[in-house]
Image (tube, grey):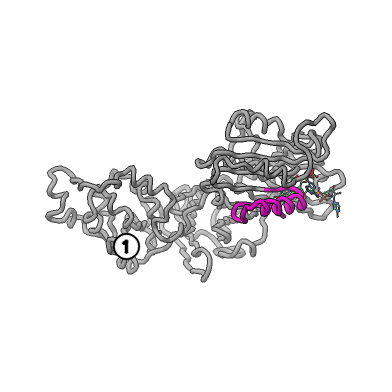
Amino acid sequence: MLNVPSQAFPAPGSQQRVASQGRSKVPLKQGRSLMDWIRLTKSGKDLTGLKGRLIDITEEELKTHNKKDDCWICIRGLVYNVSPYMEYHPGGEDELMRAAGADGTDLFNEVHRWVNYESMLKECLVGRMAVKPAVPKGMLSKSQVTDTLPREGPSSPSYDWFQTESSVTIAIYTKQKNINLDSVMVDLQGDSLRAETFIQDHSYLVHIGLSHEVQENFSVRVIENVGKVDIVLQKRENISWKCLGQPLEKHDSFIPKKDTGLSYRRCQLISKEDVTHDTRLFCLMLPSSTHLQVPVGHHVYLKLSVTGAEIVKPYTPVSASLLSGFREPVPPPNKYIYFLIKIYPDGLFTPELDRLQIGDFVSVSSPEGNFKLSKLQEVEDLFLLAAGTGFTPMVNVLNYALTCMSSLRKVKLMFFNKTEDDIIWRCELEKLAFKDKRFDTEFVLSAPSPEWNGKQGHVSPALLSEFLQRSLENSRVFLCICGPTPFTDEGVRLLHDLNFSNDEIHGFTA
Ligand code: FAD
Ligand code: NAD
């Protein structure tokens, strides 16, 4: 890797030598303070020009980015485009330019050691140096890095592995910034490790027969701003591994998600609770050797074997409750998946599911779905239209909106059911509306009792235009709709008639 010799810095005559103690600061232009920089980094502006993609950079490539308006610097193996930061740098542009197109690690260590540059510059991260990273102290060297670039879609990820006396870490370099714990699914069965990472609409698979035994429990970490996933396995015996293991089926493949099959793991039924006369809350426990988190708005398939035949149906996980703190004791996160499922007495799958005893097993697939959380960015008014169990995807969307969307002003649910007895979590919805003034809910019944004095009927122009009132005239809106197919189709048609665009609507369909 390129290194700017440390003795060359600060250069004779530089502002830092002029100052008797440490470095001097240069006056910054107005609007270029640290706070201004933080504001800029949080504005969502693309500061690398790569639209969130992370790339591998060769020394040759790095060298070419050596001008003020195109200045890349490598710090501890990671490459940053510091051009947008030039005017905000308290030490001045000239000091930054000393490391332009080069490895500025030594320079940085001398002058900025105390600065949290990873956080300051995270929006400027371009990628990492395409050389094999140095093996950290205490780890034994051994690696396999692949790097093939597909012609279209995201760059192909690669993986590497390291070991200490007691652990083995498999590091997956996704080359994408917006990776989180939902993006990774890991199953460890005996010596077989299967790790699938979802990157945009693609799937990257690490599938290995491990060379030595490991313990059942492992941990998964995601370093979001670097797009790196670490799977940390614990060795059964503290011996040095000479190789990670043997490649298994489709190992190291990177293919469109639609071309991958579903993978299943057996989960145990932990509890079953009546929510309405025909709908129950099922709690399933994932095996301890599985890491699986279903992204907001996505679903999984449940599979049961009934007299030798396998039956599979899709279901959308929900949170255990709409109101945290209502259920005690709170189980540890990520080990349990909850489902609200309506039992149809004459249905194929749900009566079988309902017959399961606590402790029985049901297979749960990898997640699927095309809902994109990025659609909710900067949304101010969120409208949710649900019918019957079409409420299920709304649960996590609603939780996400109220906890993570800083732009949100209002979220409204219009919930269509046949009768009052069919309304799922009515009490929780009412309590939530009372607790959080941004949330409001309206119930519409298609077959109400004579006592019902609320709204009635099917989805209609009159109901929608009254419901879809923006909090401000030009507020940014988004609408989600889910229910029986005729309901969703009719709803989407009416929303188009009301001049909402496809970009503003997500219809959950099969
Ligand atoms: P089915 O055998 O499918 O029968 C259901 C009902 O339809 C019965 O009353 C049956 O008599 C009737 N029926 C079946 N075939 C016909 C026919 N040809 N003509 C007329 N009527 C017929 N459901 C939930 O409860 N919770 C969820 O979280 C959930 N998430 C879903 C997510 C997705 C992406 C999708 C597509 C569906 C989801 N569903 C959910 C619905 C679920 O997948 C099943 O369709 C539902 O549980 C019924 O399954 P079943 O096999 O028991 O009933
Ligand atoms: P339901 O029969 O109890 O009906 C609920 C409401 O839907 C009715 O009160 C009515 O207002 C409306 N509705 C029903 N039929 C309609 C029609 N033909 N035209 C207009 N509106 C109509 O509903 P349910 O038994 O709970 O079924 C829920 C449906 O939602 C299922 O078909 C299920 O597959 C679907 N679902 C889909 C997803 C997904 O992500 N795609 C998730 C969960 C549920």
In-front residue for pair 195/319:
319
In-front residue for pair 76/25:
25
Q: Quadrant of the N terminus?
A: bottom left
Q: Quadrant of residue 465?
A: top right
Residue type, mark 1 in image: Asp
Quick check: can you spot residue 58?
yes
Badge 1 marks a residue whose secondary structure is strand
Tell me the residue at 30%/66% (across/down): 63
Locate residue 430, reporting x and y percent.
67, 30
In-front residue for pair 139/323:
323
State left or right for residue 306 relative to residue 380: right
Q: How many marks?
A: 1
Locate residue 45, reporting x and y percent.
42, 53
Tell me the residue at 77%/52% (across/down): 486
State left or right for residue 332 relative to residue 121: right
Locate residue 31, reporting x and y percent.
30, 46
Instruction: Tell me if residue 458 comes above or below residue 249 in the rendering.
Output: above
Q: Which residue bears the numbered disc 1?
A: 70
State left or right for residue 449 relative to residue 30: right
Q: Which residues are magenta?
A: 481-510
Whether the residue carrying mark 1 lies under 8 Å from ligand 2 is answered with: no
Quick check: can you spot residue 189?
no
Q: Quadrant of the C terminus?
A: bottom right
Give yes or no for residue 303 being in the magenta stretch: no
Locate residue 125, reporting x and y percent.
39, 55
Instruction: Tell me if residue 255 comes above or below residue 418 in the rendering.
Output: below
Give yes or no for residue 507 being in the magenta stretch: yes
- Residue lying furthest right: 346
* Number of other residues with Cα within 10 Å of mark 1, as a class: few under 14, some 14 to 19, many 20 or more: some
In-front residue for pair 392/348:
392
Instruction: Tell me if residue 49 comes above or below residue 123 in the rendering.
Output: below
